[in-house]
Amino acid sequence: NSSSVEAAVKRAKRARFVFQSKGNEQQFEHAESVLDKLESAKGALNANATSKAKTAIEEGIALVTKRMKVIKIADKSQYSWATVQEYLSDELASDLEDEKSEFPPRCFLSNNRSALRNPQFVESAILELLEKQLINEHSFPPHCVNPLTVAEGMKLRLVIDLREVNKYLVKPKFRYEDLRSLIGYAGLFRISELSSVKMIDITIVHDGMSIFVSKRKNDQFREGHTSIIARSGKVSCPVSITERLLVLLASPKESCSPVLRRIVRTKNGAYFHKSLGISYSTIRDEFKKYVSPFVNDPSDYCLHSLKSGGASNDGYKLSDPELKDRHAGWKNPCTKRRYIKRSHSEMLEVTRSMGI
């Protein structure tokens, strides 16, 4: 727009100064950006363009506020402006907890006893890794130095001990029971439909997945229905969680075995049955068990609540009507109304719109 062009022209006309310090250069550029906003606001006020002046002032305030925030981060962190650079490179780190956990404590850990017992093997193994360009050699010490371990057996193996670093890694977990609820919610499936899904019915691509259901209650022509679910990139992403489940099932993609399988528990642990599915009553009991911490009365909820909950989601209700019907497999509007629940505030809008 014109204001951006004007600001660029002004900057080009200003005499450029070569700074010896990168920090001073960044501070100068920040002050210059704020000055541009103030000059734009001044020009807009002279032209009686109050809305344009207001926008320029708000943008200037945002610049100053952001600068104040990063100064506070630098002051609180033991790594000062290094933490700020990490924060600015990842805008997701916006709350205080993220800011505090940008860097783990600096550590230089000694090698484990097994590595100290085999110094010649450790040296030769490192040289071999360097020759194969599997690791890089640096002249400056890293932020964290992790200890080396030698696995002693028929053949010695060099292992890097990452237990200290692993404390600071995010490890998203999921329950198998949560997966059933999540996919039912996202795809608006009844549990009977979800139980019929086989390995061969799921196709996963880079931006989402498709789930084919051979029979739905509202499928009058027995054509089946394909539900498309997007990849969100969040911890709760139904696509990524399904990918992890399929790895655990360890069955061929072309298999006709059910995706929702019985869990076999033994004294040595638990595993998925190779072919047996799970009964409706078991799913119902587990659903009520896992939903109970989040609701007042679990008896008010049943497996149809998955489809009703997804259909009543605020974002879903704002979607294109035709796309909603295709996603849920609805062919009759009367059927849809049974599942979409309206909130109290939404119902109040009916009489408010009447102007009485």
Image (cartoon, grey):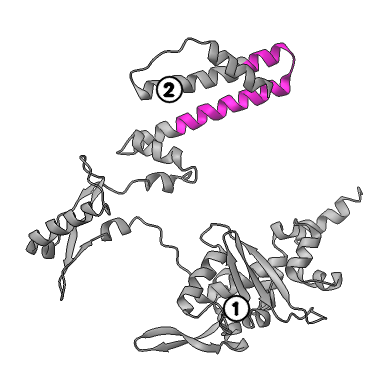
Q: Is residue 265 above or below residue 27?
A: below
User: In which image quadrant can residue 126 be found?
Assistant: bottom left
The quarter of the picture where residue 207 lies is bottom right
Of the pair 308 and 126, the residue shown nearer to us: 126
- Residue at 27% x, 61% y is 163
Q: Looking at the picture, how far across and down is residue 164, in whole percent? A: 26, 57
* Residue 289 horizontal side relative to residue 110, left or right: right
Viewer-nearest residue: 177 or 140: 140
Q: Secondary structure at mark 2?
A: helix
Q: Residue at x 91, y 51 (%)?
A: 354
**Residue under label 2:** 27
- Amino acid under label 1? Ile
Which kind of residue does numbered mark 2 sit on? Gln
The residue depicted at 77 percent of the width and 61 percent of the height is 323
In this picture, which residue range is highlighted in magenta? Answer: 40-69
Q: Position of residue 61 (x, y in %)?
A: 56, 26
Residue 49 part of the magenta-drawn span:
yes
Give the residue pinned by disc 1: 200
| Residue depicted at 12% across the width and 56% down the height | 123
The image quarter containing residue 8 is top right
Disc 1 is placed on an element classified as helix
